[in-house]
């Protein structure tokens, strides 16, 4: 049905985006759990940076295995490095929003999950486009 509405190519991209978003939701859980686990030990900003690397690695693995499973395979190490590099722009947007919110909103400093969610939303579309174009290139 989606193919009839959007056409085959657009429906494929839409489904890929939905899988990417599902993987991203899992990454959000990993990201949030890592921030909450580390913030008391290393501080909120360092916890946010560390959590991004952990969550980005998680999402790369599951995007490789599921969301972009039809993409050409390159070496895992090279692909992970390219993924982290391309997602660095999304990182700036994501963690910029996070840092602004935990700095200027007492509510977000107390409940960083809100700042994490806002950052994820801000970087999601940019991250999908970069992953699709530069990391998980279709065969």
Image (tube, rainbow, N blue to C red):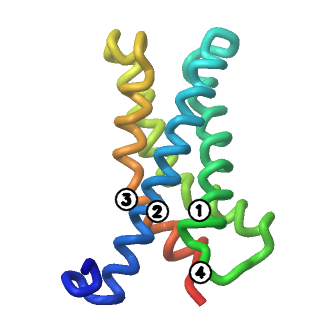
Q: CA distance from mark 2 to mark 4?
A: 13 Å
Which class describes the residues within 10 Å of circle 3: few (<14), some (14-19), or many (20+)? some
Q: Is residue 41 above or below residue 8?
A: above
Q: Residue at x 66, y 83 (%)?
A: 72
Q: Are marks 2 and 1 in contact (CB under 8 Å)?
A: yes
- Circle 4 SS class: loop
Residue under circle 3?
125
Q: CA distance from mark 1 to mark 3?
A: 15 Å
Numbered circle sitting on residue 19: 2
- Circle 2 SS class: helix
- Classify the position of the N terminus by image quarter: bottom left
Q: Tag count in the figure?
A: 4
N-terminal-most mark, 4 or 3: 4
Task: Tell me residue 71's x, y (percent).
Answer: 60, 80
Q: Residue furthest left?
A: 5
Q: Residue at x 63, y 58 (%)?
A: 62
Q: Are marks 3 and 2 in contact (CB under 8 Å)?
A: no
Q: Are marks 1 and 4 in contact (CB under 8 Å)?
A: no
Task: Tell me residue 9's x, y (percent).
Answer: 35, 87
N-terminal-most mark, 1 or 3: 1
Which class describes the residues within 10 Å of circle 4: few (<14), some (14-19), or many (20+)? few
Which class describes the residues within 10 Å of circle 1: few (<14), some (14-19), or many (20+)? many
- Circle 1 SS class: helix
């Amino acid at each position: 049905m989606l193919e009839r509405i959007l056409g085959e190519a657009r429906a494929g991209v839409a489904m890929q985006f939905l899988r990417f978003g599902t993987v991203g939701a899992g990454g959000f859980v990993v990201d949030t759990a890592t921030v909450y686990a580390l913030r008391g030990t290393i501080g909120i900003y360092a916890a946010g940076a560390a959590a991004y690397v952990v969550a980005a690695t998680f999402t790369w693995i599951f995007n490789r295995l599921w969301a972009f499973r039809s993409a050409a395979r390159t070496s895992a190490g090279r692909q992970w490095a390219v993924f982290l590099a391309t997602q660095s722009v999304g990182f700036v947007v994501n963690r910029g929003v996070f840092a602004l919110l935990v700095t200027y909103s007492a509510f977000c400093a107390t409940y960083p999950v809100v700042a994490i969610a806002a950052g994820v939303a801000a970087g999601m579309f940019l991250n999908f486009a970069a992953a699709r174009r530069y990391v998980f290139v279709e065969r």
